[in-house]
């Protein structure tokens, strides 16, 4: 009994799945992947410490103080009146006693304000009946009224308590406020999408260059279609990136929620938070695959790390221009510029995510995602073709037509 014939190569999708599973498991269970996950932690820790220390320094040193230099009785009366007034006007600076003067004692208020050992913005001198405020013009004009009220209170010419003002909150949010808040959400979404794409897409390039140096890529290309190799590597790196993003997102969300924050504190996008996050996942995947396919094409033409750096720099700059283009188009919804930003494949993920924050319509995202899938397929096919031509040398020989032309010319000259 004869055995059934064995089929040849795997299909493109099946072979791509094999490559994706191989690369995904090899990277996921490597020791370097753990340090990859810890990579963003160190900048966040340093940034958090720097921000906390900077805020503390700013709070303790940058807050201006108002000094007072009067007789002991006047200082006590003015301080009590000022503290009561400060309870109603929270923007007022702290009152600091600079000096308690004896009768007839002179005091230089200008020198006190210029003294670098103190953080004085202005100084009150004179008496409650005739107060003198010394400082820069903008500050003394702003504090003139509160100092006058405090002086009147110290003289007993003001009420012992101030009436509470009732606030009437008739309008919670206007249309202008809603549009402005959605623009903020769109800008934040675009920025996060761009940073994650540029941070993680470079892994595709480094992986391909490493396997080219080890001749592994040529063995794979001899066994399965090159399109499948490129497609498998793209999806493997995309899966690795999503593992990293999930770990970072869960950790960051836990810390964010533990700090007492919630999504209700932030402007909601037009499509709602669940749909916005879902579209963000899809547009990151499309943006990653588009940029990764370009990096694969670059890796197919580069043979050294130096060539990789030289060739990838223009792509990085062009992607930055695409991000700026999408950001510029975001402020002009419905215009020709905004439509162009959604059609250009490398700016389309950023422009469409911004549209999700501003426009509740969903059918446009279906069209955009379908177009981006087509562009990914075209870029993968082009990258595989370049690899076969430049590395595997399976395309038509470069310069063959020129050599044949010179050969015919040489034969003609010999015959003559």
Image (spheres, rainbow, N blue to C red):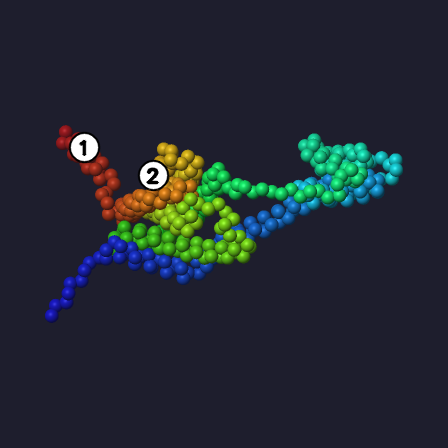
Q: Neighbour class for label 1 at 10 Å: few (<14), some, many (≥20)?
A: few
Q: Quadrant of residue 194?
A: top left
Residue 409 got which mark? 1
Residue at point 56% right, 42% down? 169
User: Which of the two residues, 17 or 157, is positioned nearer the viewer here?
Assistant: 157
Where, quadrant-wise, is the C terminus in this rendering? top left
Question: Which of pointers 2 and 1 lies earlier in the amino acid sequence?
Answer: 2
**Foreground tag (2 vs 1):** 2
Residue 343 got which mark? 2
Residue at point 38% right, 33% down? 335
Residue 341 got which mark? none
Q: Is residue 11 visible?
A: yes
Residue at point 41% right, 38% down? 326
Q: Where does the image place residue 284, in percent across and percent down from the top left?
A: 39, 48
Q: Where does the image place residue 76, in percent across and percent down from the top left?
A: 81, 44
Q: Where does the image place residue 360, in percent across and percent down from the top left?
A: 39, 43
């Amino acid at each position: 009994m004869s055995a059934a014939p064995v089929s040849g190569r795997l299909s493109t999708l099946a072979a791509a799945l094999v490559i994706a599973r191989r690369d995904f498991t090899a990277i996921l269970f490597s020791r370097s992947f753990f340090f990859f996950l810890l990579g963003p932690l160190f900048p966040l820790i340093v940034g958090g410490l720097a921000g906390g220390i900077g805020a503390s320094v700013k709070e303790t040193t940058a807050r201006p103080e108002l000094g007072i230099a009067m007789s002991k009785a006047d200082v006590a009366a003015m301080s009590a009146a000022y503290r009561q007034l400060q309870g109603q006007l929270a923007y007022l600076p702290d009152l600091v006693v600079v000096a308690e003067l004896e009768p007839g004692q002179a005091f230089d208020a200008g020198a006190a304000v210029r003294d670098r050992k103190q953080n004085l913005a202005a100084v009150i001198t004179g008496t409650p009946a005739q107060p003198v405020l010394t400082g820069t013009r903008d500050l003394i004009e702003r504090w003139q009224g509160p100092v006058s009220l405090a002086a009147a209170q110290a003289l007993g010419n003001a009420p012992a308590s101030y009436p509470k003002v009732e606030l009437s909150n008739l309008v919670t949010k206007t249309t202008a406020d809603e549009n402005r808040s959605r623009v903020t959400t769109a800008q934040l979404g675009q920025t996060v999408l761009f940073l994650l794409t540029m941070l993680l897409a470079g892994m595709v390039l480094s992986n391909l260059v490493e396997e080219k140096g080890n001749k592994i890529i040529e063995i794979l290309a001899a066994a399965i279609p090159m399109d499948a190799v490129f497609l498998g590597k793209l999806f493997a790196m995309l899966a690795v990136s999503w593992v990293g993003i999930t770990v970072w997102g869960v950790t960051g969300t836990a810390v964010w929620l533990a700090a007492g924050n919630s999504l209700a504190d932030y402007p909601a996008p037009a499509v709602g938070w669940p749909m916005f996050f879902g579209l963000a996942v899809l547009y990151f995947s499309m943006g990653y695959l588009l940029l990764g396919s370009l990096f694969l094409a670059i890796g197919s033409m580069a043979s050294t790390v130096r060539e990789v750096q030289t060739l990838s720099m223009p792509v990085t700059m062009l992607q930055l221009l695409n991000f700026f283009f999408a950001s510029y188009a975001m402020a002009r919804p419905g215009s020709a510029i905004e439509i162009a930003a959604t059609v250009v494949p490398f700016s389309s993920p950023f422009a469409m995510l911004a549209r999700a924050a501003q426009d509740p319509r969903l059918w446009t995202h279906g069209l955009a995602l379908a177009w981006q899938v087509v562009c990914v397929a075209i870029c993968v096919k082009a990258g595989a073709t370049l690899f076969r031509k430049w590395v595997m040398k399976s395309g038509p020989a470069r310069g063959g037509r020129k050599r044949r032309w010179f050969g015919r010319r040489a034969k003609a000259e010999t015959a003559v």
